[in-house]
Image (cartoon, rainbow, N blue to C red):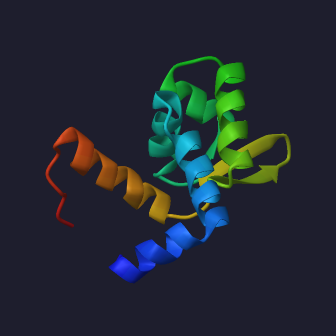
Amino acid sequence: MNKDDIFELIDKHEHIETAARALKAIAHPLRLKILCVLGEGEVCVQDIVEAVGTSQSNISQHLAILRDKGVLQTRKDANRVYYRVGDQRTLQLIVLMREVFCGVPPTRG
């Protein structure tokens, strides 16, 4: 991102609001765990519950927040709902945050 991109973002209030809402949605430890689970692909609620280790009602509440803010997308198949990260760049953002804030060196791949 260059300087012009940053100034364009600052000039567009609605972009700042949208970005802030999305960042607020992912800025919860349990939601970050959920996103890491979904980084492996499309996953049903029960599998998320098992991977994260909390109740289904708790997971469902957090999934609803992420979906409402446009971070997740869903697909229904019979009586199961499958979740996936809407934009794979979200996962890149999580990796970058880990590198910047946790001191983890960048991965090479």
Image location of residue 13, percent across then percent down: 63, 64
Q: Residue at x 47, y 38 (%)?
A: 32
Depth check: 103 or 47 in front? 103
Please name the residue shown 23% across and 49% down the image. Answer: 100
Q: Where does residue 25 sit, x and y in percent of width and height? A: 59, 41
Farthest residue in the top direction? 55
User: Can the viewer see residue 62 in this picture?
Assistant: yes
Q: Nearer the viewer, residue 73 or 22?
A: 22
Q: Is residue 1 above or below residue 70?
A: below
Q: Quadrant of the C terminus?
A: bottom left
Q: Residue at x 63, y 17 (%)?
A: 55
Report whether residue 2 is seen.
Answer: no
In this rendered view, identify the residue nearer to me: 29 or 13. Answer: 13
- Looking at the picture, how far across and down is residue 86, in whole percent? 61, 60
Tell me if residue 63 comes above or below residue 73 in the rendering.
above
Residue 62 placement, left or right of 79: left
Asked which quadrant contains residue 15, the reply is: bottom right
Q: Residue furthest right?
A: 78
Left or right, 84 with respect to 32, comes to: right
Task: Please give left or right for residue 109 compared with residue 90 in the image.
Answer: left
Count of all numbered marks drawn on residues in the image: 0
Residue drawn at x 56%, y 72% as measured from the top left: 11
Location of residue 69 with respect to 11 vertically, above or below: above
Q: Give the image location of residue 14, x and y in percent.
A: 67, 64
Quadrant, the N terminus: bottom left
